[in-house]
Amino acid sequence: MVKRMKKRLIPALSKAGKPGLAARIDVDSDRHGKSSAEGVAVLKKKWGLGSRPNGTVTKEVWKRLGFHVHDEDANEGRVLRGIKYERGVVEVDGNWVAAPLAKILLNARRKGDWDGVVTSGWRPDSYQAMLFEAAVKKYGSEAAARKWVAPPGRSNHRHKDERAAADITLAYQAVNSGAGLYLPMSWEDWHVQIRSAHQAATAAPDGLACC
């Protein structure tokens, strides 16, 4: 699909007045390289797709290039920051975020209510296990590590539904925008969740981390 995308990206760039950039794209490579990503960002800016156009080939980009695919089809096999794509997540700022939470954050950004960045989103238990193991090595014991990193199976970042969590910058701005978010942990003022799930959220006992 990457090769097919590039074959349509090149004429689209030439038509947009970027023949030099189009000429640098390697149509024989099945990797979405630097020039290809730059070309996508150029077209997204021209088409008015997002306030921070990047090289991610979104559903709308596929459609503009003449393809008819679902986001899931375009994302199959993709890896972001060491985490492989699974159904039910959306890319936001280079991170997978559970779709319900991603919708809220992107809507808040689109309306100008929030201009922060997502720094961490959905994490499967296998990835959480690596984070916890690293914390154990850093802090010397599981008990000490649990104050900073949740063990696998305990993090709210593992959910893809209304219980989902994400770490963002300018969290208070997003929470106060009326977007339907809240900060469940006073000691982690970057960790947000969907307000409607507040009653169902399980607080971490004894001040243990749940991220």
Image (cartoon, helix red, strand yellow):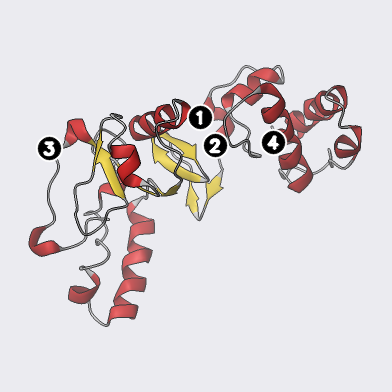
**Residue visible at 17% across and 74% down?**
143
Question: In this figure, which residue is indicated by the disc labeled 4?
Answer: 41
- Write down the residue under mark 1: 72
Residue 112, can we see it? yes
Judged from the image, the secondary structure of the residue bearing numbered disc 3 is: loop
Structural crowding at the residue carrying mark 3, measured as other residues with C-alpha within 10 Å and reported as few (<14), some (14–19) or many (≥20)? few
Outermost residue toward the bottom in this view: 140
Q: CA distance from mark 2 to mark 1?
A: 6 Å
Between the C-alphas of marks 3 and 1, the distance is: 28 Å
Which of the two labelled residues, at mark 3 and mark 2, occupies the earlier sequence position?
A: 2
202 left or right of 91?
A: left
| Label 4 crowd (10 A; few <14 / some 14-19 / many >=20) | many
- Measured as percent of width and height from the top left, residue 147 is found at 20, 68
Left or right: residue 133 compared with residue 208: right
Inspect this view and state whether residue 166 appears.
no
Q: Secondary structure at mark 4?
A: helix
Which picture quadrant has residue 70? Answer: top right
Q: Read off the residue under disc 3.
A: 200
| Residue 198 to residue 131: above or below | above
Residue marked by disc 2: 76
Q: Position of residue 126 (x, y in %)?
A: 36, 57
Report the amino acid beneath label 2: Glu
